[in-house]
Amino acid sequence: MNYKLIRSNRRTVSISVLQDNSVTVRCPLTMSESRVEQFVNGKKEWIDRVIKANAKICGANLPVLEFKEVLIKGTRVPLIISDANAVTQSAVFVKSKSNIKRLYINYFTEELRSAGFALSEELNIPASDFSVKAYKSRWGCCKRDGKIILNYLLAMLPAELLRYVIVHELCHRIYFNHSKEFWNLVGRFEPHYKILRNKLKAFNYLTNLY
Ligand SMILES: [Zn+2]
């Protein structure tokens, strides 16, 4: 099996498989090649499972990955190259695919912020502000000063997942960590948060697309 090996000043060995199926192993400086090999072999079944799951995600979302379609609130609509940028209910028009990010930020920022403020009121957890940003590896972020930042790509997700991400970030206003207490609080507002969290993972491919 091909994998990238990164040695560093760490104590344990770990393995990760990205959405492009690339495998990376991180291990301590002194670990022998054969030990690393042994570790990777022991993880083979798990690696195969991840690669199969990746293929499933890729197959199911091919029109999106090929920029023929794009998501609006969980619904796939045609992505049409045109002489103007516009979002309608039935299609998204862009001059080039490099305009998608800017178009979505312009078009959906106020809506995402409103969703944030509405949930803040519903849950009775204040946030000092909501803003929208293009993140590559996260859906949202809660700052120590009470500001919550939402990934503009949330506009592409079904409403239940947008809601889950905002609830999650709002709960960080109470617990600034991922402790048991934090998840209990999330569970009070979103009893099915584990299911939602898994559904969200299936959309991670979007974060490297635009
Ligand atoms: Zn979190």
Image (tube, rainbow, N blue to C red):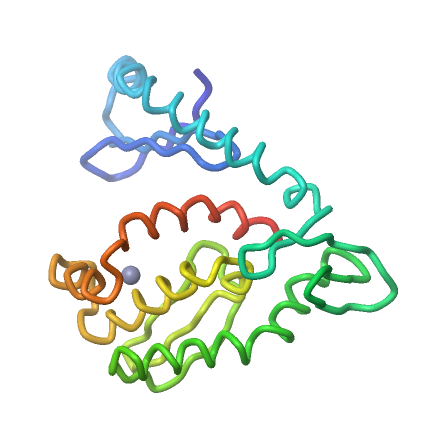
Residue 104, x across and y down, in percent: 63, 67
- The quarter of the image holding the N terminus is top left
Q: Residue at x 68, y 65 (%)?
A: 89
- Residue 101: image quadrant is bottom right
State ligand 1's quadrant: bottom left
Residue 117, x across and y down, in percent: 39, 82
- Residue 103: image quadrant is bottom right
Q: Residue at x 31, y 48 (%)?
A: 195
Q: Would you say 54 lies left or right of 210 here?
A: left
Q: Residue furthest left?
A: 181
Q: Residue at x 81, y 62 (%)?
A: 95
Q: Would you say 36 lies left or right of 56 here?
A: left
Q: Residue at x 35, y 77 (%)?
A: 119
- Seen from the viewer's position, the closer of residues 68 and 48 is 68
Residue 168, x across and y down, in percent: 30, 65
Count of labels in the image: 0
Q: Would you say 152 lies left or right of 120 here?
A: right
- Seen from the viewer's position, the closer of residues 161 and 11 is 161
Is residue 66 depicted above or below 134 in this figure? above
- The quarter of the image holding the C terminus is bottom right
Is residue 95 depicted above or below 195 in this figure? below
Residue 11, x across and y down, in percent: 18, 36
Is residue 21 depicted above or below 169 in this figure? above
Is residue 131 depicted above or below 190 in this figure? below
